[in-house]
Amino acid sequence: MIGPLLDLPRRAFRIPSGRTGLVILGLFAASALVGPMVLPPPSAMPDVVAGATPPSRAHPFGTDHLNRDMLSRVVSGGRISLTVALLAMLVSVTVGSAVGLVAGYAGGWIDAILMRVVDAALAIPRLFVILLLLVVWERIPLVALILVLGTTGWFATSRLVRGEVLRLRAEGFISAARALGARPARIIARHLLPNAAGPLLVAATLGVGEVILLEAGLSFLGLGIQAPTPSWGGMVLDARPVMVTAPWTALVPGAAIVLTVLAVNLVGEALQTALDPRGR
């Protein structure tokens, strides 16, 4: 299973939508890496009195109301937003996979208790839980924000992994491994997890787009990444006073959010198609 799984990104790249999404994400990733070396600091304010200026040769995306370069801030905000989304999804996938593997393999009362906890958590809107957690912080640290986003998003992942484990548990190679005396931990790590990794990868990819939107929404509400650290949602919030007179201050970060989420969803759908035997 490891070989086909490693081949999954290549098969997804053959699909036009997946190729488009990967190219867009590659451009954002490259700009996030190279941007700080060639662009001015995102907090630099060369002429505060001038305020927001429209796009020009010196500032391709214009400047905001504090005369900060929009291109530099979008690139820096992308680095922060993508890092938060990827790390939060890593936390979510790790916790959800562990719970799903244990519940699916152990079965019985362990499965029943874990799934009732998951059902209860899924009944509460995720945004409501996050707002309750964040409202107690006047200024939330970046690490805490990542943990909050990650630990509130693993419930659906655990159900997905549990379903895959229940399907695989009845397969002959699992029975053979048990007959040979393999320990449960070895069966889970060497047989169940690799075979459940394909659907898990698709779900994680699609989940990154959801976290990007969630982080942007929280920053727009003033509960996410705090100024002066740039983030796409925070940039839209900063643009509210000048949105009519300087619309590019909101359109540029808004377009970055839309393009990134669209690209992530295109890649996720391409991975899903590549994983489906009927789509090959």
Image (spheres, helix red, strand yellow):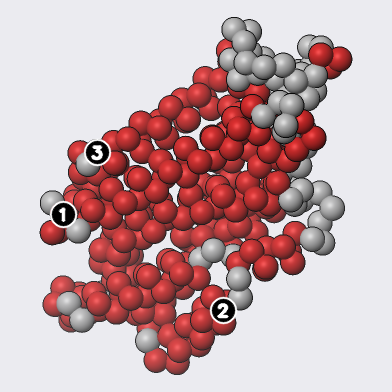
Q: In the rendered view, would you say 251 is above or below 130?
A: above
The residue wearing badge 3 is: 16
Give how far across and how far down residue 17 sits, in percent: 29, 41
User: Is label 2 in a helix, a strand or a loop?
Assistant: loop
Q: Which residue sits at x=60%, y=67%?
A: 126
Q: Which residue sits at x=59%, y=7%?
A: 57
Q: Amino acid at mark 1?
A: Gly
Instruction: Tell which residue pokes out farthest to the front in this image.
Output: 244
Q: How many marks?
A: 3
Few, some or many residues within 10 Å of mark 1 (<14, 14–19, 20+): few
> What is the quadrant of the N terminus in the image?
bottom left
Instruction: Tell which residue pokes out farthest to the top in this image.
Output: 57
Q: Is residue 41 visible?
A: no
Q: CA distance from mark 1 to mark 2?
A: 34 Å
Q: Which residue sits at x=41%, y=41%?
A: 263
The residue wearing badge 2 is: 123
Viewer-proximal residue, 114 or 243? 243
Q: CA distance from mark 3 to mark 2?
A: 37 Å
Viewer-proximal residue, 77 or 105? 77
Few, some or many residues within 10 Å of mark 2 (<14, 14–19, 20+): few
User: Is label 1 in a helix, a strand or a loop?
Assistant: helix
The residue wearing badge 1 is: 279
Q: Is residue 194 visible?
A: yes
Place residue 202 in its image quadrant: bottom left
Q: In the rendered view, would you say 210 is above or below 165?
A: above
Nearest to N terminus: mark 1 or mark 2? 2
Nearest to N terminus: mark 3 or mark 2? 3
Q: Amino acid at mark 2?
A: Ala
Few, some or many residues within 10 Å of mark 3 (<14, 14–19, 20+): few
